[in-house]
Amino acid sequence: MVAGGGFAAVEALLALRALLGDRAQLTVVAPTDRLACRPAAATEVFDAEPPRGYDLPAIAADVGARLRRDRVQAIAPEMHRVRLRSFATLPYDALVLALGARAQVAIPGALTFRDQRDVPQMRRLLGELRAGAVRRIAFAVPSGCSWPLPLYQLALLTARHAAERRLDAEMIVVSPARAPLDLFGPDCSRLVRGLLRERGVRFIGGSVPAEVRRGGSLALQFGGTIDVDRVVAAPQLCGPRLSGLPGRWWGFVPVDDRGRVEGLQDVYAAGDMTSFPIKEAGIAAQQADVIAHTIAAAAGEPREPIPEAAAAVHQLHARLLGGTRPLALRGRVERRGGRTLGGHAFREPVGPLSAPPRLGGRYLGEYLAGSAQVAV
């Protein structure tokens, strides 16, 4: 059983079918029929194309999996059963949880940009910018656990949007980190800083945003304010709330290097819900691959499992638009702790905003690119 309807869940389905063939009966429990391309949410604010998404029932049919529209609410690991929101219970031999994280407001008074749900609000803010009602916008990264890259993307594209229309506007990125996107390593961070400078985006590092005060100023946690008209913030991410599932700081689920949930037998977790600190779609897909190989090995599949060295390191891919050419960021991070092992960046050819993001899984990117019938 695979629980979830995001990239990690679909990667797990594709990998399990590829590794186990017809030996496995696959069930996917998902709350929706649509696989949304959440990494593309920031670019969709500025793109006239319809939101990118994929038909989850069509994907399940391709893989030969049974799709159930529901949510997992509780786990009884000693009985190998789950309870769903509909109060039905289902058995499993192996359970792969890919439920994502809960996105909460981290900076009171700010526009919290989570994903496609907040595209209309961001477009209204652009309308205020064009009308002259808003001039200075801060893009604030909160303390704690968050994924900052969409905010950088929004800041760069908003700055380009303003420059193309010759608007008197200023964009500011405020972050607790000392350097922009330093999780990719110092070389990438220097290029990102240069890209921000190229677009006139001011970077204020080593500052923890706290709240938006009356009148629009952004208050910092350890004193001081930044005078702005509006604040756009990344959400604070927290783990799921499932009975029977262990949790650590902010409710994230502890797993080992093979994705096994600590203290539970035949239960695995991948993606944003886990205690791995970097919450990114490509890494979630790579975690799902490791889990699929682990399950296949336990089932007696003769193929070689993913080597320990490969399972211990994740490849981090990102793409920043807004400059004269897109900036591709590449990094390597340790599976334990998420420590950066190095990275590099390079300029890509100019491409459309609607180009799909590169995904780090072994199966998902190629499958979506070659299966036009599942695009919606």
Image (cartoon, helix red, strand yellow):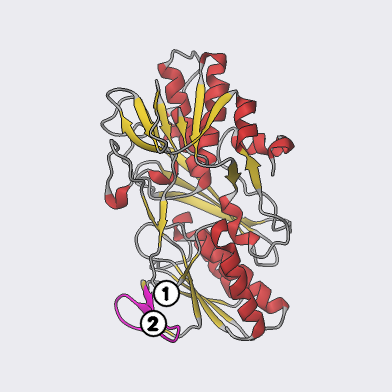
| C-alpha separation, residue under disc 2 versus residue under disc 1 | 7 Å
The magenta segment is 210-224
- Is residue 64 among what the camera can see? yes
Q: Position of residue 219 (x, y in %)?
A: 37, 80
- The amino acid sitting under disc 1 is Gly
Residue 197 vs 320, above or below: the answer is below
Residue at position x 69%, y 42% in the image: 375
Q: Nearer the viewer, residue 88 or 175?
A: 88
Q: Position of residue 217 (x, y in %)?
A: 43, 83
Residue 42 in magenta? no
Element under label 1?
A: loop
In which quarter of the view is residue 84 placed? top left
Which x, y percent locates residue 110? 45, 72
Q: Is residue 144 left or right of residue 125?
A: left
Number of residue marks: 2
Q: Name which residue lies at 50% across and 63% down.
A: 113
Q: What label sits on residue 213 in the rendered view? A: 2
- Taking the image as shown, residue 93 lies to the left or right of residue 128, namely left
Q: Which residue in the protein does label 1 denote?
A: 109
Residue, x 57% and y 22% (percent of image)? 18
Query: In this view of the protein, which residue sits in the foreground, 360 or 243?
Result: 243
* Residue 306 visible in the displayed image: no
Choose the circle earlier in sequence order: 2 or 1. 1
328 lies above or below 323:
above
Q: Quadrant of the C terminus?
A: top right
Identified by mark 2, the residue type is Arg
User: x%, y% of residue 226?
Assistant: 42, 83
* Element type at mark 2: loop
